[in-house]
Image (cartoon, rainbow, N blue to C red):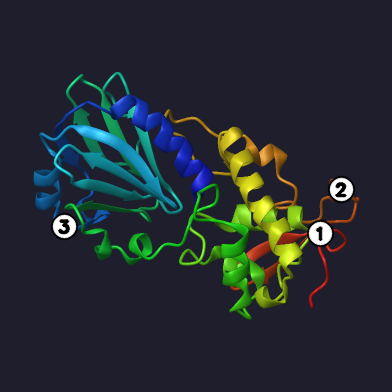
């Protein structure tokens, strides 16, 4: 699933390409991909409107239109948004085609149709609980060491599970949670409330560092992720633990292990990351 870095990379590119252009037509190839309102209502809210900005909140892409409406895309595991300047789709799994005033095309594709598309009037983000109830994001002013310390102090859940809770921290998924815990030297099964202030500071720094590195490297691609140009990222070449079960730790040479935490596959180094407390 695209996480915050991948969605941010898509946002930056699409914001450059789409801002100021008007949606002239919309072809809906798979109506059930639109979760709210109806496909007819979605068309009415989008067609004829100019794109003001492409924004992001956590893993959601938000296309802000000139009348205040927002077209919201939650890519989930296999969704993608690709800008085609020549106006032709090359995606055999295209689900929505946005035709723009300069002849270009924005293609929403989704291989397994796991993503979701919405159109929201101004002030109605409350319709999407995952969006309206999301916690502060890494690299934001609201995400601070004090905030993280307060968040962990109230929860007995494993720290890995807490990092994936979007109501606590927005945008972190499985890849960057594992990488953050490795960099901070914290075992994924540690109880969140067992972390000290010093450990929280290390974890805070690690989270921001791995998110920034993911953006710098163009995102992580194992199978489905593509940026707004349809290209893959290369952060997978620099991962320390994720998807490296049995390979040697780049720091100490110990084989990377994989366990399940909260139903999610979790990679860690048993030597570099502290034992469960």
Say which residue appears at 90% left-offset and 51% top-offset: 252
- How dense is the environment of label 2, judged by Cα within 10 Å: few (below 14), some, or many (20 and up)? few
Query: Quick one: label 1 or label 2, which is nearer the N terminus?
Result: 2
* Residue 248 horizontal/vertical position (percent): 85, 50
* Residue 12 horizontal/vertical position (percent): 42, 33
- How dense is the environment of label 3, judged by Cα within 10 Å: few (below 14), some, or many (20 and up)? some
Q: Quadrant of residue 91?
A: top left
The C terminus: image quadrant: bottom right
Residue 73, placed above or below residue 192? above
* Residue 118 horizontal/vertical position (percent): 24, 53
Provide the residue designation for mark 2.
251
Say which residue appears at 43% left-offset and 36% top-offset: 10
State the mark number for residue 37. Answer: 3
Provide the secondary structure element on which disc 3 rests: loop
Q: Is residue 34 left or right of residue 92?
A: left
Provide the secondary structure element on which disc 2 rests: loop
Contact, CB < 8 Å: mark 2 with mark 3?
A: no
Q: Is residue 221 left or right of residue 185?
A: left
Provide the residue designation for mark 1.
269
Query: Quick one: label 1 or label 3, which is nearer the N terminus?
Result: 3
In this view of the protein, which residue sits in the foreground, 65 or 102?
65
Query: Quick one: label 2 or label 3, which is nearer the N terminus?
Result: 3
Contact, CB < 8 Å: mark 1 with mark 2?
A: yes
Q: Quadrant of residue 11?
A: top left
Q: Quadrant of residue 16?
A: top left
Q: CA distance from mark 2 to mark 3?
A: 50 Å
In this view of the protein, which residue sits in the foreground, 222 or 277?
277
Q: Residue furthest front?
A: 146
Q: CA distance from mark 1 to mark 3?
A: 46 Å
């Amino acid at each position: 699933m695209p996480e915050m870095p991948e969605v941010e990379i898509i946002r930056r590119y699409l914001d450059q390409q789409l801002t100021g252009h008007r949606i002239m037509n919309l072809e809906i190839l798979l109506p059930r991909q639109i979760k709210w309102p109806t496909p007819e209502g979605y068309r009415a809210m989008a067609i004829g409107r100019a794109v003001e900005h492409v924004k992001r909140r956590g893993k959601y892409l938000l296309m802000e239109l000139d009348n205040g409406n927002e077209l919201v895309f939650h890519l989930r595991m296999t969704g993608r948004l690709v800008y085609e300047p020549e106006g032709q789709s090359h995606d055999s799994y295209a689900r929505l085609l946005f035709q723009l005033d300069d002849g270009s095309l924005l293609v929403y594709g989704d291989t397994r149709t796991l993503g979701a598309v919405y159109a929201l009037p101004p002030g109605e983000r409350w319709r999407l609980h995952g969006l309206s109830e999301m916690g502060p994001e890494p690299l934001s002013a609201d995400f601070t060491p004090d905030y993280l310390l307060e968040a962990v102090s109230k929860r007995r859940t494993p720290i890995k599970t807490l990092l994936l809770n979007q109501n606590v921290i927005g945008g972190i998924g499985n890849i960057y949670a594992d990488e953050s815990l490795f960099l901070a030297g914290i075992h994924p099964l540690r109880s969140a409330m067992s972390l000290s202030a010093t450990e929280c500071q290390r974890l805070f720094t690690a989270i921001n560092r791995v998110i920034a590195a993911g953006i710098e490297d163009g995102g992580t691609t194992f199978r489905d992720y593509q940026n707004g140009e349809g290209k893959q990222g290369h952060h997978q070449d620099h991962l320390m633990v994720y998807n490296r079960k049995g390979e040697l730790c780049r720091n100490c040479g110990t084989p990377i292990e994989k366990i399940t935490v909260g139903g999610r596959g979790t990679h860690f180094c048993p030597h570099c990351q502290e034992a469960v407390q």
